[in-house]
Amino acid sequence: MTTLANGGTTTASHRVVLTGFGVFSSIGVGAAEFAEGLRVGRSGAKPITAFDTEGFAHANGCEIVDFHPEKWITALDAAELGRASQFSVAAACMAIDDAGLQVEELREQRGLISVGTTDGESFDLDHLVESRLARGPEHMDSTIARRIRAGRLSAAIAHELGLTDVEAITIPTACAAGNYAIGYGYDAVRTGEVNFALCGGADAMCRKTFAGFYRLGTIAPELCQPFDVDRKGILTGEGAGILVLESLESALARGARIYAEVLGYGLNCDAYHQVAPNQQSVARCMELALENAGIEPDQVDLISAHGTGTKANDITEARAIRSVYGDTPPRTVSIKSMLGHTMGAASALAAIACSLAIVHGFIPPTINHFTTDPECEVDCVPNQAVAADLRVVQNNGLAFGGNNAVVMLGKYEEQR
Amino acid sequence: MTAITAEDATKVKEIVCEILELEEDEVTDTSLFREDHDADSLRAIEILASLEKEFKIVIEQSELARMVNLRGVYDVVAEAQKAAV
């Protein structure tokens, strides 16, 4: 998607592959556990404990309950990082381990760190505002205040790992931000601007976002039920997904395991409405991704939907899919049924889920599904995973403000 | 039919006009927020939230369908007040 220099030509055009994953989710930590959670249709839904939920008639969410950042974050003091930054740094460390990379080697190379987020450190902001209102500004905690810049979600990764020849960027395009971050990394590796990219998204549960969605009437009382006729909304979640992107040459040269190939991506922003999705623009974004990846619609084996479980999203997205794919679209699942809406981490975790589905040959189910909404005419693979040979998978990320980003992933094959 | 007091009706109108950024003489009891005053669904939710706060009542989200003009809002508020007693 970047405009290339030299009148549209570039000397380098690398194939880009995914070789390492860092995963924190309510249904599993690490790629292996996450894959297992997806396969068995695990649910991360439970009562929220991250903040006081008094006054809300219902308050389920998909929290990560036993997160120990100090297991991963060793150079920095974890207490100096907000929870979202802790997730992103821990996930980046895990991803590098998973890729079999040595930090010392990465320090010698030029890299990119791009992390998407919706809320940044809003959990900390909640606390600062609360203490200011209750006790006055002089009682705001200075340690917490130092943690709140969203730029730290990416910068802290560079800091922790001692990476100096990197661009570290936090991309705040809300619930599609993970895909934006992957797209940015894809371009940088593809054109040879960098040798490696650590990309993904991170978010932590916070009262601000819960209350906002609650007020919009879009928080489900108990479960997230995408594409179901009785769906009642989202469950907020948290976590991080960080992916290691490198060129195919680099991965082959070091004998790395290749999870999947990034085939391309598309993004657009329609600014049509603050919260209402626009069908035409969502469809256009998918077309942009297909075009960028050089893929025809009939080659796509699976769509990982944005699939929030709200009335508006699921109808609009299903219709947009049918407008691009016709009357027999690929199977279209929502992993948010299992891990809730992890906001800026959502499309990054979904990209990892798509890759694991490709590697392990299965389609993750849409759980909590009873009756498909006749207005959402897609096969969402209800409740049970199915075996499938997947060559091309599309990962949708759609966000407020009409920020859409779609990433195309493919099984790694020597010839493509 | 539960009626709203004149005093509460004045307050409701004030809140609605504040949120929709309208002068009070631009709005009639039956002029439609969306069609006549260009309001969108987020403004409707803002109105609902402000009314809940002002009158210490609970208004179900489904009532938004009736809150299309001032008369609809008066009725919904009156019923919610009655339910809160």
Image (cartoon, rainbow, N blue to C red):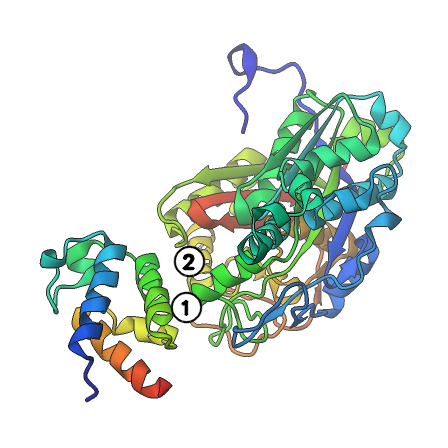
Q: Nearer the viewer, residue A145 or A174?
A: A145
Query: Which quadrant of the structure image shows residue B3?
Result: bottom left
**Residue B76 appears left or right of A281:** left
| A135 relative to B53, above or below | above
Q: Which mark is residue A316?
A: 2
Where residue A180 sits: x, y (%)?
A: 58, 39
Residue at 22% of width from left, 51% of height from top? B21
**Residue type highlighted by circle 2:** Thr
- Identify residue for label 1: A375
Comparing labels 2 and 1, the label whose residue is closer to the camera: 2
Where residue A28 sits: x, y (%)?
A: 78, 61
| A66 relative to A367, above or below | above
Query: Which quadrant of the structure image shows residue A134?
Result: bottom right
**Residue A10 appears left or right of A233:** right
Categorize mark 2 by other alpha carbons within 10 Å: few (<14), some (14-19), many (20+).
many
- The answer to which of marks 2 and 1 sits earlier in the sequence is 2
Kindly state the secondary structure of the residue where label 2 is placed: helix
Determine the chain carrying the residue at label 1. A
Image quarter where the N terminus of chain B lies is: bottom left
Whether residue A301 is visible = no
Where residue A340 sits: x, y (%)?
A: 62, 63
Image quarter where the C terminus of chain B lies is: bottom left
Q: Are marks 2 and 1 in contact (CB under 8 Å)?
A: no
Q: Which mark is residue B81?
A: none
